[in-house]
Image (cartoon, rainbow, N blue to C red):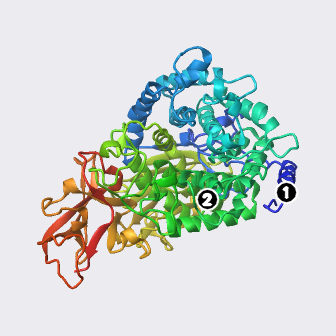
Amino acid sequence: MTTHHLSRRTFLAAAAGAAVPPAFSRAGGALASLVPNSPPSSAENWKDAGVIDLSRSPYAKLKTVPVHAVVIEEGFWSQRRRTNLDSSIPSMHDELVAHGRMNNFLRLIGKSSAPQTGPVYSDSDIYKWIEAVGFSLQSGDQPGLRQTAAAMIGDVVASQESDGYLDTYYVGDRKPLRMLYPTQTTGHELYNMGHLLQGAIAYYRATGNRDLLDAGIRFIDDFLLPNYGPGPNQKGIVAGHPEIEMALVELYRTTGKRQYLDLAGYILHGDPRIPLRPQQIVYMFCGIPFTDRTRLEGHAVRAMYACCGATDYYLETGDASYWKTLNTLWNDLTRHQIYVTGGVGARETGEAFGDPYELPNARAYGESCAAIGNMMWNWRMLAASGEARFADVIERALYNGINSGMSLDGKTYCYRNPLAFDPSGDSADRHTPNGKIRNPWYDTTCCPPNLERTFASLPGYFYSTSSDGVYVHLYDNSEMNWRLHDGNGLRITQRTRYPSSGDVKLTVTPGTPSEFTVYVRIPGWSPRNTVKVNGSAIPGAHPGEYLPIHRRWSANDTIDLSFDMTVQPLRANRAVNDDRGRIALQRGPIVFCMEKLDQQHQEEAKHMCDYVARLDAPAESHFNPDLLQGVMVLEQPGTVVSPTIDRGLYFPVTESEHPTETPTTLSLIPYYAWANRAPSPMQVWIPYTKV
């Protein structure tokens, strides 16, 4: 087992000598005839990887199910995914072209005379878009989209240099800056390549086309590995912006080439030859041994991506020091750093984590990419452990802090996702020009294609398999056609109106009747639950755990789940200054917010804080099919509190404000749906009174 006490050279040499994990037996294909008992040809195996391929990862308790094996049917997520495919991905392609992102490649192959445009990380925008296409094609062929992506890939590959280098920013006069130590910390060369590899792998698994994948391999094999690493004739290497680590591990999983895993481990371990200031190590969340980290700090996306790469490394090596550190950081996340929406990153400065309990609302950064990184990290932690606490975080982030990032029509995006907002500019910043929180384009346009690849890959997050059965993580109308580890085919269908309703019916049909365990997730937000199998009650449904149901399963066996959808008022720890004396309302996995345009007595309420919730009566909920494409609406009893006399900014505590209190009903919509109508003030955390 490697630890950070080894020298860097000894560390990598030891890793290179380790045995490659034995291949996991892949038996059967998708459940077409319910008897997939003959193994597919090796030429077809590329189709069967999940969002990440854990089929041969020795320390993954759970194995991923391919995107193509799960069909999300008409329901909550189908509408979102349809918009993503029909509106978001095509319109983002047009935005990328209009803003010169492809011209950066075309000018290198003589197809454009336009100058280089965009920041140093602009190439990654194209790669994330290709990844979104790749995951979309894994759910079904889209000939026009595939042809568009193939043409773009052809131009990208044609721009690669003979030594394998590929980055459109560091060319011409900037060529001497390539991979210099200052460039590595800020230049995003490895970040761009990491996204190329992820996009290439997703596209390869959808189509079998290796063109972009082979270009990425050439960069690693011909340019990076010979020149950068621990050897005496090699130069130092630092990620700068973590991303390359998880991409290298996924490349190892795809090719079986151990050097990629070893290089990821070396980068995670840090290279002492590169001089870094303490603030750089904090901000970049790399450059020292990952296992020396004790808290989340610095740039939130970098920290989340570093945790993803470190978890990937653990899943392949089983290094206990990594698992210890990952759990330490996860505890810091969930106890001190995560918003009720699943968003992370409190500060605009540095797009960074703050101090423990530093969770401002109006100034919340909550970058969409950071919430996605949170989901990606927890997906890996879930695979390593099989523990529902990680799935609960995935669900919270997905339904709220991620889902809020894309408008309902799929054409505008939130870069940051605050929990209070005033379009007059009180809470605006560089990512809210003219008070608009949603925009079709940002010069740093990392979030839009990141959201698109997440929604495109969503079917791959619903289920996992294990040595003894299958895990059900997420709930929506869907059908899984896959197989157990012994090769027996398995179909699971879900029928539900989740998250509007807490009732879910699972129908389990194995190819051949057999004994195995179905693990159903009991959400941590649901205090009262019932589970029935073929009509008979099953005990042991505890919040925040998987309920294992072990039996001999036959065709059309049913599991009926009922979760508690009572509206829950939530309070924050008193150390969270912005939330003291306030509540947030949650129903099921959905966090709600108030937009002023929905409220009564708007003239009396000069500020959103003038609306006060009364907790002596519960909120009522109803579904409004005509509002915001159909949403659940909460009606919470409350008052509008307004002073009769304006006493100025400060006054003695002995002087009463003599406020008037007007009874009202507070109207709340899901947080993910805010800012989809006319500009309006918004708040998640609401002042409250118990009487």
Q: Which residue is mark 1?
A: 7
- Residue at position x 53%, y 16% from top? 112
Q: Which residue is mark 2?
A: 381
Q: Quadrant of residue 45?
A: top right
Q: Is residue 677 above or below residue 531?
A: above
Q: Residue at x 51, y 63 (%)?
A: 354
Q: Examine the rendering and report whether any part of residue 568 can be seen.
A: no
Task: Say what amino acid the circle numbered 2 marks.
Answer: Met
Q: For the residues marked 2 and 1, what is the alpha-carbon distance in whole angstroms?
A: 28 Å
Classify residue 532 as left or right of residue 686: right
Query: For mark 1, does the 10 Å Cα neighbourhood hold few (<14), some (14 to 19), or many (20 or more) residues?
Result: some
Q: Is residue 424 left or right of residue 40?
A: left
For the residue labelled by badge 1, is the local secondary structure a helix, a strand or a loop? loop
Q: Secondary structure at mark 2?
A: helix
Which amino acid type is shown beneath numbered disc 1? Ser
Say if 219 sits above or below 66 in the image.
Answer: above
The residue nearer to you, when weighing 129 against 123, is 123
Mark 2 vs mark 1: give the one in front: 1
Q: Is residue 350 left or right of residue 497?
A: right
* Mark before the other along the chain sequence, 2 or 1: 1
Residue 397, percent across and down? 46, 56
